[in-house]
Image (tube, grey):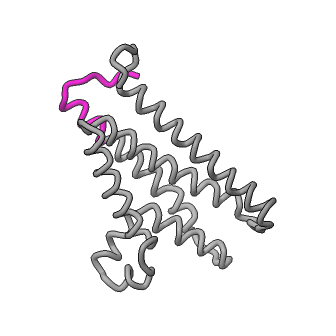
Amino acid sequence: MILLSKTNENMMIISKVTMGVIIGTMQTLLVYVYSSFVLKVNWGENALKYMLLYIALALFASMIGAIVGIVSKNDTAVSGILFVVTFAFSILGGCCSTREMITSIPFINKLAYISPIYWINTAINTMICNFKSNLYIIALLVPVVLSIIIFIIYIIIMKKRGEALDV
């Protein structure tokens, strides 16, 4: 934190998360525009839903990054924690293995349900195949709810430190 500024940690978190969501939105729009006009990709009728899922994922990633950055003592700890969290969510989401491998191990299958990437991948695959389901709503809610849980944990940590939570 900048020691000379009059801002507090709460405002820092709000600004970091807001900027993360703005950057995530810009990245999503950039991919959409480039793929639509240069690569001639047809996003179909679910284009807005895909974008909202990625923006929700940006919210979750920004919240984790901001909270870990504030709570951790140094850059090495932040890097290590974020690497482990990112790698774990990626594995559970099916980014590093097949979905069949994840679902074949009961414990990992249940654990995968906490990964926003798992739900987003599943929802997008469902929409691409034109299956009727509520997975889109679940995939949208999971990163938002996890972001709220992370923020509540941050509030608890701040209260244990004895620091005020004014915004």
x, y percentage for residue 23?
Answer: 58, 42
- In the rendered image of this protein, does residue 100 appear above or below residue 153? below
What stretch of residues is rendered in magenta? 153-167
Left or right of residue 165: residue 12: right
Which quarter of the figure has residue 7? Answer: top left
Where residue 17 appears, as percent x and y from the top left, is: 47, 38
- Magenta span: helix, strand or loop, mainly? helix
Residue lying farthest front? 76
Q: Residue at x 70, y 64 (%)?
A: 46
Left or right of 157 on screen, residue 34: right
In screen coordinates, is 141 left or right of 44?
Answer: left
* Quarter location, residue 142: bottom left
Quadrant housing the N terminus: top left
Q: Is residue 140 left or right of residue 76?
A: right
Residue 135 vs 158, above or below: the answer is below
Magenta highlight on residue 164: yes
Q: Would you say residue 160 sits in the magenta stretch? A: yes
Q: Nearer the viewer, residue 132 or 44?
A: 44
Residue drawn at (41%, 28%) of the image: 12
Q: Quadrant of residue 48?
A: bottom right
Instruction: List x then y, in percent, for residue 57.
Output: 51, 54
Work out whether residue 18 or residue 127 is closer to the camera in this orientation and state it. Answer: 18
Q: Residue at x 41, y 47 (%)?
A: 147
